[in-house]
Amino acid sequence: MWGNKNLPEFGCLSGVKVVHASQSVAGPFGPLLFAEYGADVLWLENALAPDISRSGASFGPEAERVNQRNLALNIPTPEGMEILSRILKDADVYVESTKGGQYAKWGLSDEALWKINPRLVIAHVSGFGQTGLPEYVGRPSYDAIAQAFSGYTYSNGNPTTAPYAVGPYTADYMTALFQAVAILAALHKVQKTGVGESIDIAQYELMMKVQNAQPDWFTEARPVNPAGKPSIMAGWGCYRCSDGEYVQLCLIGGGIVKKAVPFFGLEYGSDEIPAGTAIIFAETPGGKKFLDAVDAYLGSKTAAEAADEMRAAGLPATKVNTLEDLENDPHVQARDIIEEWESVKGAKVRSVGPVPRFKNNPGRIWRPAPFMGMDNEEVLAELGYSADEIASFYEKRVVTKDAEMKFTYPYKQFGR
């Protein structure tokens, strides 16, 4: 039986065993959350090709693979499948992120995996799902493909530019969050029934789901008003201030409008902005006056001044922050969410720690991201393989190791 003997006991998911054979963001970010909440997470990296994230120069993957062990495994070999079966026999969750149908082609259908472990929760993460038209199921996909196919890119169109995918990696992170919630739901059911579950996560479907305009179209063919176009609501959007920086305003709701109108020097309860107005529409006479008043006010204030004054008046407004702004923000500092640790290469890494916060069983970062194959011998020994068998796996390239850490992020220090 495998298990990380060095794993400290902490968090709400202590005792849960999660295995993932995934790369980039959409697959691995869900297991990261489990690892930060105390689960025993084993990452099966492709023995023949390092995770694509390792090819970049970002510290992002260094923060998104913490608290995990790494076994670099060539799964679709006879030995690789035998190793995988031993791993899954004791696992609670398995996440994979190949193209739809790939595992079935390898002979690793859900039913085959349930013969190994009837209680296993299986999560298939792909661009277009496991079922449907074969020519779609087998399509390769990335974050931007999912956004474009799902209509999300169109919904964020801008009249001055071509349609664009919203970053950073919105579809990937959204997919990972749906993945995590679905896995937890499946684990809850398995505890009651003892019967495993398979989750078909089609990335484009999730991006369809999170568009609040989609039921208007599917119900009565009402066209989408792209978010990048000027808002139909006066006082909703990003507005430029005198220092060239921006504030985000959300001036809607009956109580907010009642405060906002006199704040900008206009009469609340007039014919143009009647009492009880919840939304001031931009194309109405009152909306045009309101927008003129907003622009005049912001043109005389810096973004920080405007945001402070408007918040003091009870209005929802904030300066549009950079990451530098956030690092220096007193509230962010008071909540102490930016943590620091040392990578396996000895580099200092600073990143947002486990969130949301748990009061009684907090998450934590206890181990840096592993290099490729870092835990091969340890995991294989736990599975019952001898030193000679492990050596033969290396000879056959069933397992590999980046002993020199040449593929390990961060591969350079950016002058630090």
Image (spheres, grey):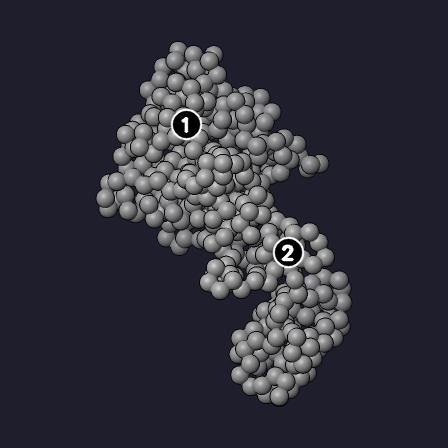
In the image, what residue type sits under mark 1? Lys
Expressed as whole percent of the image width and height from the top left, the position of residue 413 reads 66, 34
SS label for mark 2? loop
Q: How many numbered discs, if any?
A: 2
Name the residue: 76% across, 67% down.
Answer: 242
Crowding around mark 2 (Cα neighbors within 10 Å: few <14, some 14 to 19, many 20+) is some
- Report the side of 2 relative to 325 (left or right): left
Q: Farthest residue toward the left?
A: 193
Q: Secondary structure at mark 1?
A: helix
**Mark 1 packing: few (<14 Cα in 10 Å), some, or many (20+)?**
few
The quarter of the picture where the C terminus appears is top right
Give me the C-alpha separation between circle 2 and circle 1: 39 Å
Residue 370: percent from the left, percent from the top? Answer: 50, 31
* Whether residue 28 is situated above or below residue 261 in the rendered picture: above
Would you name the residue on which mark 2 appears? 157
137 vs 44, nearest the viewer: 137
Amino acid identity at mark 2: Gly
* Quadrant location, the N terminus: top left
Q: Is residue 42 visible?
A: no
Question: Residue at (54%, 25%) from the top-left corner?
Answer: 49
Front in this rendered view, residue 210 or 370: 210
Q: Observer-nearest residue: 178 or 340?
A: 178
Residue drawn at point x = 47 percent, y = 54 percent: 209
Q: Which residue is mark 1?
A: 105
